[in-house]
Amino acid sequence: MDTMRIQVTRTGGLAGRTRQAELDTAERTDAPHVHALAREAVVGGLRAPSYGVPDGFHYAITVDGRTVHCADPKLTDSQRELVSLVLREGA
C-alpha cells in the first residue's frame, strides 16, 4: 500500500496561535480515502499564502513535500475535511 505524509499548519484566528499536526497514512485502513482528499486538496490550493477573512484561519497543507495554502472561508470540501482530520488525529 502507498503511504502519504500529510502536514497541516493552521495560523491566524482570534488568538493568533499556530497549530501544527502531521499524519502518516501507512497504517490507516482509510488510506485510499485520505489519499484522494489530499490529492484534491493540493489541486485546489494556492502556491502562495492566501488570506480570507479577518481573524480567520490560514492553512498550509503539505503532502509529500508539496505545500499549498488556503484560508477560511474559501476552503474546498476536500481541504476542510483533510484539515479537520489531520488536526484531530495527527501527531
Image: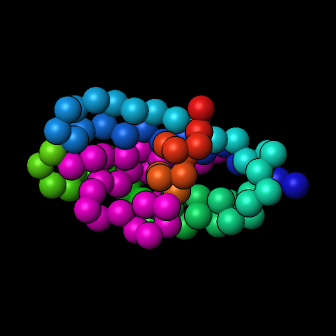
Residue 85 lies, with reference to residue 21, above or below; the image says below
Q: Quadrant of residue 29?
A: bottom right
Residue 76 at x, y = what percent?
A: 40, 68
Q: Residue at x 35, y 63 (%)?
A: 75
Q: Residue at x 54, y 52 (%)?
A: 85
Residue 7 at x, y = what percent?
A: 55, 40
Q: Residue at x 20, y 56 (%)?
A: 52
Residue 14 lies, with reference to residue 30, above or below; the image says above
The image's colour scheme reads rainbow
Residue 21 at x, y = what percent?
A: 52, 35
Which of these two is toward me, 9 or 86? 86
Q: Is residue 76 magenta?
A: yes
Quarter of the image with the C terminus is top right
The answer to whether one can see residue 40 in this image is yes
Q: Is residue 64 left or right of residue 56?
A: right
Magenta span covers which residues? 56-81
